[in-house]
Image (cartoon, rainbow, N blue to C red):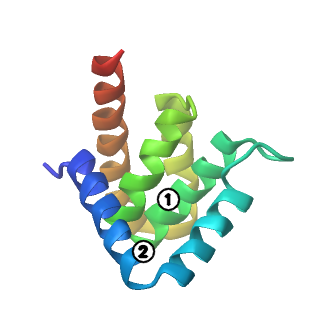
Amino acid sequence: MTDFVQIGRDLAAGMADLAKAEPETMSAFKALMAATAGQDQELSVKVKELIALAIAITVRCDGCIAHHVKLVVDAGATRGEVVETIGVAQLMGGGPSTVYGVEALRAYDQFAAVTANAA
């Protein structure tokens, strides 16, 4: 089974390394993330992260799934909301999105367990 919590940690470390290598680009990317998904506006952070998760599933990106599932959990999304998001990704992405939807649900369960154990 894929360890999405570890993938998330590895991604964070890699992003930090990339930020050292290209600080201007990564600074701009972080600012873009904060301006678009980092705050409630017309759409809540939770809704934006669910959208990002659906996109991550359809583009088949494990690191993206790990990153956005963690943020979905942090934003308080329920397992049911994630399942519904997976359904939308399946609609748009077919069979491959179904496979990555399975992975996204596993990732949600892993991150939810970590969050519950930390509480």
Q: Name the spot of residue 62 as percent of width and height, x first.
A: 32, 63
Q: Is residue 41 left or right of residue 100?
A: right
Mark 1 vs mark 2, foreground winner is 2
Q: Name the spot of residue 49 as percent of width and height, x first.
A: 59, 49
- The residue depicted at 50 percent of the width and 34 percent of the height is 74
- The residue depicted at 34 percent of the width and 59 percent of the height is 12
Direction top: furthest residue: 119
Q: Name the spot of residue 2 as percent of width and height, x first.
A: 17, 52
Q: Can you identify the residue that label 1 sits on?
A: 90
| C-beta proximity under 8 Å, tags 1 and 2 | no
As measured in the structure, the alpha-carbon distance from the residue carrying label 1 to the one carrying label 2 is 33 Å
Name the foreground residue: 33 vs 76.
Answer: 33
Instruction: Name the secondary structure under disc 1.
Output: helix
Give the residue type at disc 2. Answer: Ala
Q: Earlier in the sequence, mark 1 or mark 2?
A: 2
Give the residue type at disc 1. Answer: Gln
Q: Which mark is residue 103?
A: none
Direction left: furthest residue: 1
Is 117 rendered above or below residue 63? above
- The residue depicted at 74 percent of the width and 41 percent of the height is 44
Q: Can you identify the residue that label 2 sits on?
A: 19
Name the foreground residue: 87 vs 65.
Answer: 65
Q: Give the crowd class for mark 1: few <14, some 14-19, many >=20 residues within 10 Å.
A: many
